[in-house]
Amino acid sequence: QAQLVESGGGVVQVGGSLRLSCVASGLNFNSAGMAWFRQAPGKEREFVAALTWNGVTAEYGDSVAGRFTISRYNPKNAVYLQMNNLTLEDTAVYYCTADLTSFRPFIRREAFDLWGQGTQVTVSS
């Protein structure tokens, strides 16, 4: 059974940093594109960042570009989201997600269809 498990969320002050982790099991992680989305209370789900299966191509949402970095370490079936210079607007539940189409050479945001349970990130003033 394919599964994604996020960790690393918590409470951080404005301007601080957090690193989220997501570990995959039950899927061919090495060939899967990976991404992070987030959803704040009362708002729609928002694309944060994505990375192709080989780590060559990354995309970022406009609101996080330059502050967040997505990375992956295939030997550990893990994807990470380094979040720096956090703002109040970054408060949300962050979800790890996988695109299970093998070796897709580009990022297709609507193709991410396996989701983790989410981890809460709260930025406080």
Image (cartoon, rainbow, N blue to C red):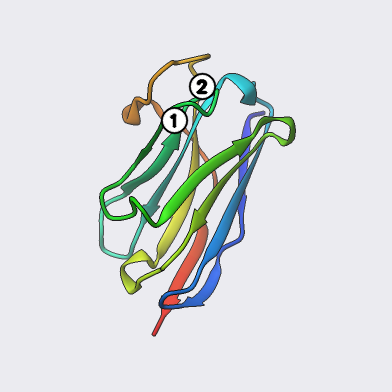
The quarter of the rendered structure image containing the C terminus is bottom left
Which label was assigned to residue 100? Answer: 2
**In the figure, 77 relative to 53: above or below?**
below
Tell me if 61 is positioned left or right of 103 in this view.
Answer: left
**Mark positioned earlier in the residue sequence (1 or 2):** 2
Given residues 6 and 66, the one toward you in this image is 66
**Residue kind at label 2, given as amino acid type:** Leu
Instruction: Classify 10 Å Cα crowding around label 2: few (below 14), some (14-19), many (20 and above).
Output: some
Q: Is residue 118 visible?
A: no
Instruction: Classify 10 Å Cα crowding around label 1: few (below 14), some (14-19), many (20 and above).
Output: few
**In the figure, 61 relative to 9: above or below?**
above
Query: Where is residue 79 shown, x and y percent of the image?
Result: 59, 41
Q: Give the number of marks.
A: 2
SS for dot 2: loop
Tell me if 75 is positioned left or right of 2 in this view.
Answer: right
Q: Are dots 1 and 2 in contact, CB under 8 Å? A: yes
Residue 106 placement: quadrant? top left
Which label was assigned to residue 68? Answer: none
- The Cα atoms of the two marked residues, 1 and 2, are separated by 8 Å
Q: Is residue 75 visible?
A: yes
Tell me if 4 is positioned left or right of 101 in this view.
Answer: right
Q: Which residue is mark 1?
A: 113
The residue drawn where x is 56% and y is 63% is 9
The residue drawn where x is 44% and y is 59% is 93
**Residue kind at label 1, given as amino acid type:** Asp
The residue drawn where x is 45% and y is 16% is 104
Given residues 117 and 81, the one toward you in this image is 81
